[in-house]
Image (spheres, grey):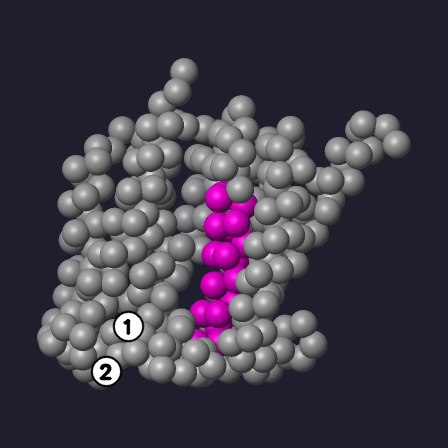
Amino acid sequence: MKETTKTKLKEALFGIAFILSCFTMNSDHLGGYWKSGGMPKIMLRYLLIFVFLTVLTIINKSNFSFISKFVKYTLWAITPLVIFDYYVTQFSGGLFLYRVWWISYIIVASGTVFLSATIIKPKNYKIFYCDFWQGFTPIYLFTLYICFLRTPFTSLTTNFRLGNGTFLMLKAIIKNPHIDFEPYLIFVGNVIIFLPLPFILSALFKKIKPYQLLLIGFAAPFIVEGYQYFLKCGDVDIDDVILNWLGFFIGLFIQQIIKKRLLTEK
């Protein structure tokens, strides 16, 4: 088999796997591959996505310009479909949490490619880094929008006692790991939601300083919780603020390591 044919085959396999991963759902409206199956099935899908995309990213390491552009444009293309489905078709699920699960699969697929690329460190990593986070930004902004920007003056719940809010979800998970998927999504989601932010900011604003990222990360949870509190919409929870900070500072720590070791090398 000619080298060009092998390259095209590897690219095709990666493309199919990435698209299929991004269209994985946990729907109560669909059957087969997309059907809701509880946490065991969700975890199995995550594992399969991670394994296949890791392998296919590694075998395409000599052609990262393809991966860079393919992931970027695929994420740009899928974001309008996610938005349309969220408001119109709702194939991904009849309830909010089902539709967010679809986004979680997109995040896992994208995160797997980014992690694999960071580990193998391709020659054009700087280009990949910027392309990836530019491609990821639209779906991320929509996720922030549906998670935090609720309709004003609808309903408001508050918890200002540490450990008496979202942390109860963790207790429920520890007590019963086979519990419904809602506690997993709410607890883990509050950690993950701000983790990509330092990466996105550093890709969009290349001269941004670490202290500026730090200030943004500190303020962001207060902004979204303050919005919900003063406009009386959503759930204002001190536990959420702590988990949001945890996710952001984990992301900032990793981003600074990548910047030092991979983005500033000549």
How far across and down, in percent of the image, does residue 138 sit? 43, 52
Marks 1/2: CA–CA distance: 8 Å
- State the SS at label 1: loop
**Residue nearest the observer in this picture, 8 or 252:** 252
Position of the C terminus, as image quadrant, is top left
Q: Is residue 131 visible?
A: no
Quadrant hosting residue 48: bottom right
Q: Which residues are magenta?
A: 95-115
What residue does disc 1 label?
A: 150
> Relative to the observer, which residue lies in front, 93 or 185?
185
Asked if the magenta segment contains residue 255, the reply would be no
The correct choice, above or below, for 263 with respect to 242 in the image is: above
Q: Which quadrant does the N terminus fall into?
A: top right
Q: Label 1 is placed on what type of residue?
A: Arg
Q: Kindly give the residue lying farthest to the front in the view shown.
A: 175
Label 2 sits on a secondary structure element that is loop
Question: Is 107 one of the magenta-colored residues?
Answer: yes
Q: Tell me, yes or no, whether the two marked residues, 1 and 2, touch with CB atoms within 8 Å.
A: yes
Q: Is residue 186 left or right of residue 99?
A: left
Residue 139 spot, x, y in % from top left? 44, 55
**Callout 2, which amino acid?**
Thr
- Establish if 83 lies above or below 246: below
Residue marked by disc 2: 154
Q: Residues within 10 Å of mark 2 (few under 14, many from 20)?
A: few
The front one of 180 and 17 is 180
Q: Say whether residue 56 is visible.
A: yes
> Is residue 80 shown above or below 202?
below
Q: Is residue 251 left or right of residue 181?
A: left
The overriding secondary structure of the stretch rendered in magenta is: helix
Query: Residue at 54% of width from left, 34% of height from top?
Result: 120
> Which circle marks residue 13 in the picture?
none
Residue at image point 22% right, 41% down: 213
